Amino acid sequence: MREILEAYGPDQFAPVSWYTSAPYSIPEALERKSWYGVTGTPWAWFDGTDEVVGGYPSGSTFDDYDPIVAAHLVIPSPVEIDAVYRMNTTTAGTLYVDILATAAIPTTDNVVQCVIVEEDVGVEHEINLAREVLPEEPLTLTLPGQTMSFERPFALSAGWNLDNVSYIVFVQSEAAGKEVLQATWARNGRGIGVSPEDELHATGDPGGPFDPSSIVYTVENLGPETIEYSVFASETWITVTNETGTLTGHESAEVTVALSAEAETLGRGLYTAQLFFVNDTEHIGDTALNAYLQIGETGLVYGYAMDTDPGWTAEGLWAHGQPTGGGGQYGGPDPSSGFTGLYVCGYNLSGDYENGLQETHLTTTAIDCSHVSLTTLRFQRWLGVEQPTYDHAYIRVSTDGTRWDPVWENDSEIADSEWTQVSYDLSALADGQSTVYVRWTMGTTDALGRFCGWNIDDVEIWGIIGDDTGIEGGDVTSGAAILSNYPNPFNPSTTVAFEIPARTRVSLRVYDVAGRLVRVLEDAMVGPGTHAVDWDGRDDDGQTLPSGVYFCRLASGLTTETRAMVLLK
């Protein structure tokens, strides 16, 4: 189902999963199980037109249902649904539904269903798990132009992840076949909405010009009450026009985010700034987006042609040399030479990998990426490996030789019969890091079926080599990051979690909207890993701060990142 949703997007597809086992079962799930006549979990998939797309017990169904969804999307629905939810408290609200008949509706046994769903609950294969079904409403429309409206109060359980809760409304027949006439996601009916969701990605040479140089956002008041809004950027190479204002009910305003003259003074590198769209009246719908500025083109930084042994650490049957073209019990044999030249680094250059193999690694020497941004790994690959139910191949990266972050792993059987260039973005892990290790892993493998394994050639590190002015002038993206602050909004305290890929000095500071430093949360050497710091809403003198928006700024090595926090009283 997730593949269908990713393929068509939420504007065209509204899926609901009904789970019939504890602790996630609800009575309506059991009812729908009998509706669809399946023996497993009844997945009701709605394509927003006229019919149930799913109801399938198990397994991957993308190939089965992709053509069905595509066919139904061209069929017009006889109804349009507009659904809005408004939260009255953190856990209680009201769902408002308006329905318009756009064509004659052939049957009268249709009902409107309202389902509260939760994403990422940890149930295998499930997406948008049905948590509660609100009382249904009979569809009273039969002729085009007719309308109906109703509302449903609801309460959310404290055990749910409220950030992952959504509301889906659909019209469905109660007759045989259980056709779905239309389905939609309810939108937030209070606070501000920001569109588009696109982020500014500007590129150019040092000194400019940059393209695009700006982006226009629409800030919309989604509710009926008047609100005030403000828009801020975390960096001075970004300017904001129409950055504050007052919006009456359902009014909108255009806000232009553009590069300032300071952008022309920055050196080569990738810079990132955060944009904060703040509902100053009630802080509902506060939104953070990023703006990116790439100065200079990416190019080759390091290359390993494999004509000579690179001197990397090789475990087990990993070796540098000429492959023999052997192996191939399944999936085909090794190559008989490199992509360029005779030599490669590979696992068992004489044939297939072993059965019952534990993870066995080829690890580069330390690579200095301290002045590199947009770091990318490229190499020529010839790989044979069985599907991951049985056998595994990995690529990982480390900045300390101890913690290894995943870059790639096989998600299916791979049986290369020719050299293929592959490329992987390492920027989140490697940018600005003085020590970077890349590791290829063969294994684990099971007791049956052997493939030829890894062969690699022409390994390259690409990126933008930054200038000193680039590092000083802005945020060069790196692996250190603020993971979250929770709760947000908060009263009286919040916990800021951040992650550091290598031991370094960390500064974690809180600023008010005027840019004044109000609290230093951390200023010390910190080891690699995830860390958490509590902030009690007070300044460095112990004074309680007023309600408002504050900015938590993490600085580590070449990295800075800023996150908005809302203190409510």
Image (cartoon, grey):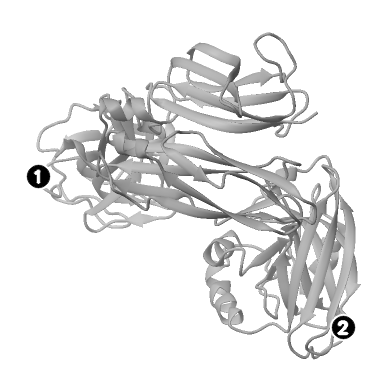
Find residue 511 and report its image quarter: top right
| Crowd around label 2: few <14 · some 14–19 · many ≥20 (10 Å) | few
Of mark 1 and mark 2, the one earlier in the sequence is: 2
Tag 1: Cα neighbours inside 10 Å, few (<14), some, or many (≥20)?
some
The residue lying at 58 percent from left, 73 percent from top is: 65
* Count of residue discs: 2
Q: Callout 1, which amino acid?
A: Leu
Q: Secondary structure at mark 1?
A: loop
Left or right: residue 149 versus residue 199 is right
Q: Report the Cα–Cα distance between label 1 and label 2.
A: 72 Å
Residue 513, given in percent of the width and then of the height, sits at 61, 29
Residue 475, given in percent of the width and then of the height, sits at 41, 31
Quarter occupied by the C terminus: top right
Identify the disc placed on residue 109: 2
In the picture, measured across the screen, residue 309 lies left or right of residue 383, that is left
Where is residue 227 shown, x and y percent of the image? 74, 47
**Residue 559: x percent and y percent?**
42, 27
Nearer to the camera, 374 or 279:
279
Q: Are marks 1 and 2 in contact (CB under 8 Å)?
A: no
Identify the disc placed on residue 62. none
| Disc 1 target residue | 342
Residue occupying image coordinates x 79% and y 86%? 145
478 to 416, vertically: above or below? above
**Can residue 441 be seen by looking at this rendering?**
no
Work out which quarter of the rendered image holds the N terminus and state it.
Answer: bottom right
Q: Residue furthest top?
A: 541
**Which residue type does callout 2 highlight?**
Asp
Above or below, 190 relative to 524? below
Q: Is residue 284 above or below residue 475?
A: below
Of residues 402 and 269, the one drawn nearer to the viewer in this rendering: 269
Kindly state the secondary structure of the residue where label 2 is placed.
loop
